[in-house]
Amino acid sequence: MQKRVLFFSAAIGATLAVALSYLYAKNNYGWLLALTCVAVALTLACVAALLYLSRKNASPQQSVYSRKREFMSRSELEFLHTLRTMLGNRYAVCVQVPLVSVIEKRAAAFRNELFRVIDFMIADSVSYEPLLLIELNDASHNRADRAERDRKVAEICAAANMPLVTFTLAESKNPIEVKKRIFKYL
C-alpha cells in the first residue's frame, strides 16, 4: 500500500513539475519557478522513499542450503528403536555413519568411495569398536544406481572384514528375524 501511494505521489509530482515548468517558460512568473522546484523536490523524495522501501522489503537471497525437517526416515527411526530395545546397554547404535569413519583405505586414490553413508552401526558401548553395519533397504534400493551403490558397499565391507547385514522394510518389522541375523555377528 505504501509503495502504491508513493508511486502515485511521485507521478503527480513529476506531472506537476512538468506543467509548472511549461507555464514558467511561457509566462515567466517567479512564483511558478518556486512551485516547480517544490514539485521536483516532492517527486525526488517519493522516488527515494520508493527505492528505500523496495530494498527494505526485498526478500533476502535464497540460500542453496536449508535444514532438513527430519534426520531419518520414519522406517529408519522405528528400526532404531527396535535395535536399541533389542541390544540394551551392551552395544551402542549409531546412525548415518560414513564408511570412512569405520573403514580405512591404505591407498589414497578413490578414497571418496568411503564417503557413502550406512544406515546403522552397532559398536561396543565402551570402546565404540565398530562390530556390525546395517543397511535398511526401502524401494529406492531397487533402482539400478542404488543397486550398484549397494554392491560397491558390500564389496568394500567384505574386503575390510566388516560384517554388513541388510534388511528390507518388511524384514525389519520381524524382531525375531532381526535379532537372529544380528546376533550371528555379535
Image (cartoon, rainbow, N blue to C red):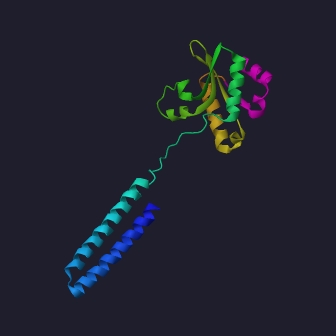
Q: Residue 28 appears at what percent x and percent y?
A: 20, 84
Q: Residue furthest front?
A: 31
Tell me: 126 left or right of 3: right
Q: Nearer the viewer, residue 52 or 82?
A: 52
Q: Position of residue 164 (x, y in %)?
A: 66, 25
Which residue shows up at 77% across the image and 30% down it?
A: 171
Quadrant in which the C terminus is drawn: top right
Would you place residue 42 above or below residue 142 in this image?
Answer: below
> Considering depth in this image, is 30 or 105 the residue closer to the camera?
30
**In the rendered picture of this protein, how many numbered marks are placed on residues?**
0
Residue at 35 percent across and 65 percent down: it is: 46
Asked if residue 114 lies left or right of residue 174, the reply is left
**Image spot of residue 109 (x, y percent):** 48, 33
Q: Residue furthest bottom?
A: 26
Vertical comparison of 78 with 8: above or below = above
Please say whether residue 141 is one of the residues in the magenta stretch. Answer: no
- Which residue is painted at 56% across and 13% down in the image? 127
Residue 88: name its quadrant: top right
The answer to whether one can see residue 184 in this image is: no
Q: Magenta segment, which residues?
A: 164-186
Q: Quadrant of residue 77?
A: top right
- The answer to which of 51 and 180 lies nearer the viewer is 51
Asked if residue 138 lies left or right of residue 38, the reply is right
Identified at 50% across, 43% down, the residue is 65
Q: Is residue 51 visible?
A: yes
